[in-house]
Amino acid sequence: MSSSKFTENQIELLRANPNVVSVSPSVVSLSKEFKAKIWEELCQGRDIHHILESNGLPCKILGETRIAGIKGLVKRIGNTDGNFRDAATLESRRNGFLSPQKRIEYLELQLKYKEQELDFLKKIVSLGQEESTQ
């Protein structure tokens, strides 16, 4: 994360870019498709600055710290499994980034688990009642 904050104008400019999923005053999140594109172009020997600029992301606004972070992240994931993600597809609850569909799936899973717990508790109670009547 860079120590410099984006201004409101910079945030609006970044949000207008189709390769950007979300922007906060400190963080810009890129789409998984764009990260894959960056990886492909890096593998072809293109410079990260050229890749970003040619896709409408001004390097002057991003800053060198963020650019280095983007490049490092893309290289690390590209060299491991190549399974790029974006903020809309993260499934981890610790960061709070869930798409509405993933949130529904998560809540349905929670509901199913609670129903199983309730059935289990009912069985335990009924077993306890059977033992007390014998």
Image (cartoon, rainbow, N blue to C red):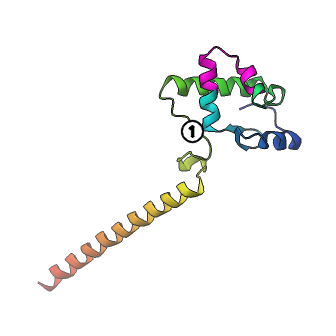
What percent of the width, then of the height, locates residue 84?
55, 34
The residue located at (61%, 16%) in the rendering is: 44
Q: Could you tell me which secondary element the residue under label 1 belongs to?
A: loop
The residue located at (56%, 48%) in the rendering is: 94
Q: Is residue 52 above or below residue 14?
A: above
Q: Give the camera-side residue of 79 and 116.
A: 79
Q: Is residue 104 above or below residue 79?
A: below
The residue located at (65%, 24%) in the rendering is: 71
Q: Quadrant of residue 14?
A: top right
Q: Main secondary structure of the magenta part?
A: helix
Q: Callout 1: few (<14), some (14-19), or many (20+) C-alpha neighbours within 10 Å?
A: some
What percent of the width, then of the height, locates residue 1?
71, 32
What percent of the width, then of the height, locates residue 37?
62, 28
Q: Quadrant of residue 133?
A: bottom left
- Name the image quarter holding the C terminus: bottom left
How many numbered marks, from 0 up? 1
Q: Residue furthest left?
A: 134
Residue under pointer 1: 85
Residue 78 counted in the magenta span: no
Q: Is residue 124 above or below residue 40?
A: below
What percent of the width, then of the height, locates residue 8?
87, 44
Q: Which residues are magenta?
A: 38-53
Left or right of residue 119: residue 87: right
Q: Mark 1 belongs to which amino acid?
A: Arg
Q: Give the camera-side residue of 112 and 128.
A: 112
Q: Quadrant of residue 76?
A: top right
Left or right of residue 13: residue 98: left
Q: Residue furthest bottom?
A: 133
